[in-house]
């Protein structure tokens, strides 16, 4: 069988989402065969990430610069903020350039079951961001789950009385749907048809 080092790598890869022990072992073999090309490239990319990965102080995105590239991009509409639960949702929305404004990552969703309270999420920083002014619209792009919607309502309440339009994704989103898993067409449709939070 393979050496301990190779086994350790396979075990590490097997923990990645979407990879089981079998495909992890296949990936290791694939890398070993391409030692000078793919393996070295991957190693360099991981090294850079390890050294330079930071959380954006403004929006909570993960990037190699702070503020992140999205916050620093002056071509983007700064008067519109899209609020998402996780970085994965931000990336899903941004992959197809569906939203041209800025983002705010909450870092999760309210959950009585898991004991996630408002102060555990980046909600206060969002309210501060809006209170500083210069923002016309807050788009609540929570997942179409019960907890996602509870979170959206809570934030909408906190924003009440502030001079900002609060909208949310139209729910052509499948019930229980997680943004990261939706195709771009469904996401685009939900974003286009966003409506005021009632
Ligand atoms: Zn940012």
Image: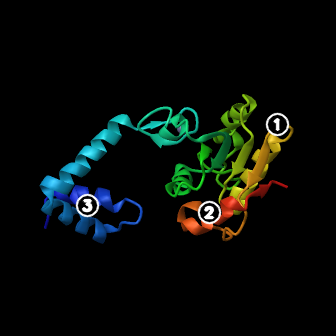
The residue pinned by badge 3 equals 10
- Cα separation, mark 1 vs mark 2, equals 26 Å
Q: From the viewer's perspective, tell me whether residue 185 is left or right of residue 16.
A: right
Query: Is disc 1 surrounded by few (<14), some (14 to 19) or many (20+) residues within 10 Å?
Result: some
Quarter-of-image position of residue 53 = top left
In the picture, the disc for residue 133 is none
In the picture, the disc for residue 188 is 2
Give the mark nearer the N terminus: 1 vs 2: 1
Image coordinates of residue 44 in percent, x first then y, are 24, 44
- Cα separation, mark 3 vs mark 1, equals 53 Å
Determine whether the beta carbon of the residue marked 2 sits less than 8 angstroms from the nearest atom of ligand 1.
no
Q: Which type of secondary structure does the marked residue at label 3 adopt? A: helix
Give the mark nearer the N terminus: 3 vs 2: 3
Q: Nearer the viewer, residue 154 or 171?
A: 171
Q: State whether residue 12 appears in this view.
A: yes
- Cα separation, mark 3 vs mark 2, equals 38 Å
Q: Which type of secondary structure does the marked residue at label 1 adopt? A: loop
Q: Which type of secondary structure does the marked residue at label 2 adopt? A: helix
- Whether the residues at callouts 1 and 2 have beta carbons within 8 Å, the answer is no
Image coordinates of residue 10 in percent, x first then y, are 25, 61
Image coordinates of residue 170 in percent, x first then y, are 73, 63
In the picture, the disc for residue 163 is 1
Image quadrant occupied by the C terminus: bottom right
Image coordinates of residue 147 in percent, x first then y, are 70, 57
Q: Residue furthest top?
A: 132
Query: Is disc 2 surrounded by few (<14), some (14 to 19) or many (20+) residues within 10 Å?
Result: some
Residue 37 vs 77, above or below: the answer is below
Image quadrant occupied by the N terminus: bottom left
Residue 46 vs 18, above or below: the answer is above
Q: From the viewer's perspective, tell me whether residue 85 is left or right of residue 128.
A: left
Q: Residue furthest front?
A: 75
């Amino acid at each position: 069988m393979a050496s301990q080092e190779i086994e350790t790598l396979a075990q590490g890869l097997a923990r990645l989402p979407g990879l089981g022990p079998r495909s992890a072992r296949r990936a290791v073999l694939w890398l070993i065969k391409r030692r000078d090309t793919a393996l070295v490239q991957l190693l360099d990319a991981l090294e850079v990430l390890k050294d330079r990965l930071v959380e954006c102080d403004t929006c909570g995105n993960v990037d190699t610069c702070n503020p992140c590239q999205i916050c620093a991009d002056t071509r983007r509409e700064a008067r519109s903020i899209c609020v998402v639960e996780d970085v994965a949702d931000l990336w899903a929305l941004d992959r197809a350039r569906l939203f041209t404004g800025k983002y705010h990552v909450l870092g999760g969703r309210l959950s009585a079951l898991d004991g996630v309270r408002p102060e555990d999420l980046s909600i206060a920083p969002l309210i501060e961001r809006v209170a500083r002014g210069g923002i016309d619209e807050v788009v609540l792009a929570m997942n179409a789950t019960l907890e996602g919607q509870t979170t959206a309502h809570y934030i909408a309440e906190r924003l009440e009385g502030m001079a900002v339009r609060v909208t949310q994704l139209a729910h052509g989103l499948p019930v229980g749907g997680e943004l990261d898993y939706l195709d771009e067409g469904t996401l685009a449709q939900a974003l286009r048809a966003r409506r005021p939070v009632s």
